[in-house]
Amino acid sequence: MAGQIGGFNEFGRIRRVALRRPEAAFQSPAKIVAEWQRLAYTEAPLMAEAAREYDRLEACLESVGATLDHLPADPSLTIDALYVRDAAIVAPGGLILCNMGKPARQGEPALHGKALGAAGIPILGRIEGAGRIEGGDLVWFDARCLAVGRGYRTNDEGIRQLQALVGPGVEVVTVPLPHYRGPGDVFHLMSILSPLDRDLLLVYSPLMPVPFREWLIARGMTLVEVPDAEFDSMGCNVLAIAPRHCVMLKGNPQTQARLRAAGCRVEVIAGREISAKGQGGPTCLTRPLLRD
């Protein structure tokens, strides 16, 4: 599998994915105690239970034939390094290393580049200087169309650098994001949008810009709506592991029923330790590298 990267969409069968297990991100109970409040977790995660929850996520990925690339621990990392989506972007030509909007996470992209470069994945470039981008703000619709959320974690200069890296053959659609809970909140474009198939999306429309929602519908997308009661429990943070086959967090029964009614096969995982406390769902926990 060395060097394989591609499938620029968010719904194809996952063939290769980068992860960082809780043991490598949290490292020790003492590190959790030292960091969880500073990083705005709701509670301190429990290491052993987090590992059990993560085992279930990995089993779902392996069930579709995915190869798992485990990213290593490093003393410079915070416990937020569990959420590997944000530090790197898959693009034609290789990996783009992000420049994180959350200051405590700015060391993560270089470590992604070191580990995945050693695994044979080419590094296309990096977002530098005043540019800021986090991976949760990017959604590939196909190899020629990439949507980017412009919010507190991703800025105009980051988007400008991204466009230069992906080149003129890729349309970069900028999506202005709402203020919502302010700059300290964990809010990305993928907080309100999860692709399920080429023409099927899970969305939370109350926080979606009207022009972007209209753009999606004009592209022929069917929208499955997340109910208000299940947005805060990350009902909209759903990972497609294959077309219309997805992984979601336990505790969102209305969304689960709507997904099944739309023809989706749904895997449900517990996520109190690995998701709820740090507000990072299945998409945040994974960096797909190769999809069909």
Image (cartoon, rainbow, N blue to C red):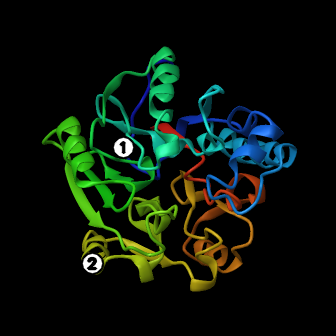
Q: Residue 64, percent across and down? A: 63, 42
- Quadrant of the rendered structure where residue 267 is? bottom right
Q: Which quadrant is home to the C terminus?
A: top left
Residue drawn at the location 64% of the way across and 62% of the way down: 265
Residue drawn at the location 38% of the way across and 39% of the way down: 98
Q: Pointer 2: what residue?
A: 214
- Could you say which is closer to the camera, residue 287 or residue 265? 287
Residue drawn at the location 66% of the way across and 73% of the way down: 256
| Mark 2 neighbour class, 10 Å CA radius: few under 14, some 14 to 19, many 20 or more | few
Residue drawn at the location 15% of the way across and 42% of the way down: 169
**What kind of residue is marked 1?**
Phe
| Mark 1 neighbour class, 10 Å CA radius: few under 14, some 14 to 19, many 20 or more | many
CA distance separating discs 2 and 1: 23 Å
Q: Is residue 144 visible?
A: no
Q: Is residue 198 visible?
A: yes
Residue 127 badge: none
